[in-house]
Image (cartoon, coloured by chain):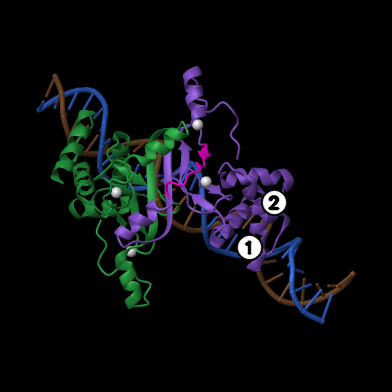
Chain colours: A purple, B green, C blue, D brown
Amino acid sequence: MEDRLQTLVQKIRQHGHRLTPQRMAILRILADSTGHPTVEQVYEQVQAQFPMTSLATVYKTVTLLKEEGEILELSFGGESSRYDGHNPQPHPHLICIRCGTILDPDLALFNDLPREICDKYGFQMVNHRVDFFGICPACQQAQSVSTTSTPQGKEQEF
Amino acid sequence: MEDRLQTLVQKIRQHGHRLTPQRMAILRILADSTGHPTVEQVYEQVQAQFPMTSLATVYKTVTLLKEEGEILELSFGGESSRYDGHNPQPHPHLICIRCGTILDPDLALFNDLPREICDKYGFQMVNHRVDFFGICPACQQAQSVSTTSTPQGKEQEF
DNA sequence: ACCTTATAGATAATTATTATCAATAACAAA
DNA sequence: TTTGTTATTGATAATAATTATCTATAAGGT
Ligand SMILES: [Mn+2]
Ligand SMILES: [Mn+2]
Ligand SMILES: [Zn+2]
Ligand SMILES: [Zn+2]
């Protein structure tokens, strides 16, 4: 939570990077958000505090965090990437193909499996990604009530 | 192998689509290839037989197969998508971050696990994707021999 | 052989991301 | 506190994979 922000700040400083107000705001948003936001969504959040902020600045900060290994990027074909600043370690995701919500299931099932598979093929693993695409519970509700193609019931939190 | 091509042809016909020589060539390449080629790579292969073929045609055929559920697309951030026309069902992949080779590990480990996880969260799964990124055996060899950043020893097969 | 229309080929448009560059501000040192 | 160096900002252009557009052609049914 607040601890995570300190980790990011520390990592930035350690490598001789500067800590600007815009950058600080971006770090705070990424450390706090639990909804895997896009760069665009982070950008909108930052603008609330610093209206002059550029989209390029958000991109550059995210790139910096990627290089530091402090953010996890989820790339998709076509649409923009989603980011997990809370937990930069590779982990499974539940991705709703209707409303776009991305959940972090807490599980220890995959702890050994990936390594096991790679060993079998002499493959030296450095990263992995496990995604389940489907319909989230909220969207299943919305589907049974109305026929509207409008997604989920509650607002999507980033 | 040859069976797979027949499945694709049949699927195309069933839905009232036409079977042009270019399209047939593309189907053959996708059915035969075991290396998860890009659209660009398929395009080059087709041009060997039909030099007048357009890149757009390859894209359109791949899109068609996606709609029919007969090809698996692996999207990445930045670089172009890779396609598995052999096995359209979602399955794990071993992806070398050095030479780009993508392997299909044969395993039955994941058969129940995904479903299990999604049930736990009331998540209605319709698709999934599991990727392991790392260094393939060939690239590990190349690394220990020379310092060249040039990838793998043998040519990459698509 | 003929008709209808899906498809091919060429090319423009789209869009997320990256590169460029002058002005500014972080921050270390004096 | 002032100063100097230079990383960073913001604005915008460039990039590149994929998609859309449009006319000519040919697939496949009659
Ligand atoms: Mn996550
Ligand atoms: Mn595969
Ligand atoms: Zn949903
Ligand atoms: Zn390799």
Q: Amino acid at mark 2?
A: Ala
The residue tagged with tag 1: helix, strand or loop?
Answer: helix
Image quarter hosting the C terminus of chain B: bottom left
Say whether residue B135 is left or right of residue A50: left
Drawn side of residue A141 relative to residue B134, left or right: right
Viewer-nearest of discs 1 and 2: 1
> Can you say whether B110 is above or below B119 in the image?
below
Q: Range of the magenta residues?
A: A101-110
CB-based contact (under 8 Å), mark 1 and mark 2 = no
Q: Chain of mark 1?
A: A
Q: Tell me the tag on residue A25.
A: 2
The disc label shown at residue A11, or none = 1
Q: Nearer the viewer, residue A28 or C26?
A: A28
- Category of crowding for the residue at label 1, using alpha-carbon neighbours closer than 10 angstroms: few (below 14), some (14–19), many (at least 20): some
Secondary structure mostly seen in magenta is loop
Quadrant hosting residue A45: top right
